[in-house]
Amino acid sequence: MYFDRFDIVSAHFAFYTDNWSGQFSNFYIRACRIRDYFNPGPCFEGYESLSDNGKVIYDNLVETHY
């Protein structure tokens, strides 16, 4: 894993949108805040669209929160 801002933001966005549990959940609020500066295109499909580094970051988020 290496530092790449795009990978970090896209992995967090994918994680929060995949795991939110309602409009007022913390993950939903975080995804909305990320959307202020990160607006993925229509081809963005979450985990499948991430780079290898992004997938590692996503997997670390899963281990941290679950």
Image: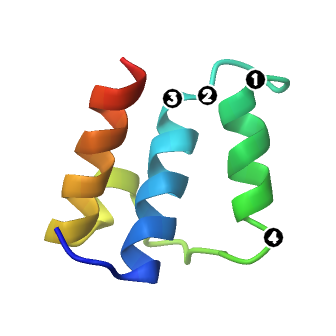
What residue is disc 2 on?
20
Closer-to-camera residue (63/42): 63
Q: Is the residue under label 3 in contact with that under label 4 (CB below 8 Å)?
A: no
Asked which secondary structure carries label 2, the reply is loop
Tag 2: residue type? Trp
Q: Is the residue under label 4 in contact with that under label 1 (CB below 8 Å)?
A: no
What residue is disc 4 on?
36
Q: Earlier in the sequence, mark 1 or mark 2?
A: 2
Closer-to-camera residue (32/64): 64
Q: Is the residue under label 2 in contact with that under label 3 (CB below 8 Å)?
A: yes
Asked which secondary structure carries label 3, the reply is helix
Identified at 35% across, 82% down, the residue is: 4
Q: Earlier in the sequence, mark 3 or mark 1?
A: 3
Tag 3: residue type? Asn
Q: Earlier in the sequence, mark 1 or mark 4?
A: 1
Q: Is the residue under label 2 in contact with that under label 1 (CB below 8 Å)?
A: yes
Q: Position of residue 21 (x, y in %)?
A: 65, 18
- CA gap, disc 3 and disc 2: 4 Å
What residue is disc 3 on?
19
- Image position of 12 (left or right of 25): left
Counting other residues with Cα less than 10 Å from the Cα at mark 4, is it few (<14), some (14-19), or many (20 or more)? Answer: few
